[in-house]
Image (cartoon, helix red, strand yellow):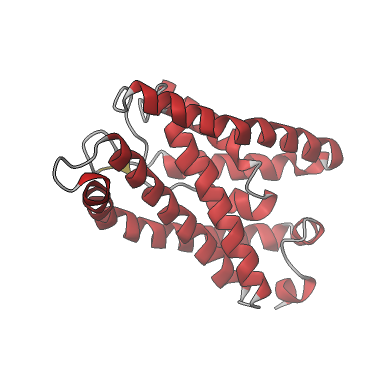
Amino acid sequence: MHIMEGFLPIEHAVGWTLAAAPFVIGGLRAVRRRIDERPEQRMLLGVAAAFTFVLSALKLPSLTGSCSHPTGIGLGAILFGPLIMAPIGGVVLLFQALLLAHGGLTTLGANLFSMAVVGPFAAAAVFRLARRLKVSLAVGVFLAASLADLMTYITTSLQLAWAFPDPVGGFAASFVKFAGVFALTQIPLAISEGLLTVVIFNALARFNPQELQQMKVTEPSELRA
């Protein structure tokens, strides 16, 4: 749901940048602390970043000034927590804006807030709730990744509705229109992303079981099953 370059009014672009900045700063500190404490997790962090970059670069035409795509943000949020994904998402979005003309620099803050702030926090919250409810690991991962994708698209719809309210129905009517158009492509994408994230997570659990246990993402009994 990258909003294209120059599409948002300047005051909205600046506002979303300021809103996202504290999460990026806090995330950078969290990344530094994690690497200092667990340097062996650098490769796993790189896998999460690469997964986010590849999936979020697969765009489909949607609304004028935007697009639909998976986010890939749920995997990293499950493994490392939501805050760390803010700077990772920021780097991913910056490279996509500069190299792929996907998104933009003026809309970087808005795109970052929806995909790399709201998405990861939604994924982490859903995954933790699934753990407490004793839901199976695969179902918890699927729900976390899928709902993170959907929350990103809902946030983008809110951002566009706020910037471009309907002349008659205002913000609410505009949100319904934006969200409705996004839903045609985003709901199937969210389901597909959830399934793919489960596949990748299972592969990581198979080859790095002890590391995931140390990160308190899984329990030994789950991986034996």
154 above or below 91? below
Q: Quadrant of the C terminus?
A: bottom right
78 above or below 165? below
Q: Give the camera-side residue of 98 and 155.
A: 155
Q: Give the camera-side residue of 180 and 22.
A: 22
Residue 171 placed where, x, y %?
27, 45
The residue at the point 69 percent across, 45 percent down is 44
Residue 84 placed where, x, y %?
66, 41
Q: Quadrant of residue 7?
A: top left
In this rendering, does residue 106 appear at all?
yes
The residue at the point 62 percent across, 44 percent down is 47
Give the residue at the far right of this rendering.
37
Q: Is residue 109 left or right of residue 123?
A: left
The residue at the point 52 percent across, 33 percent down is 19
The residue at the point 77 percent across, 61 percent down is 216
Q: Quadrant of residue 123?
A: bottom right
Q: Give the camera-side residue of 63 and 161.
A: 161
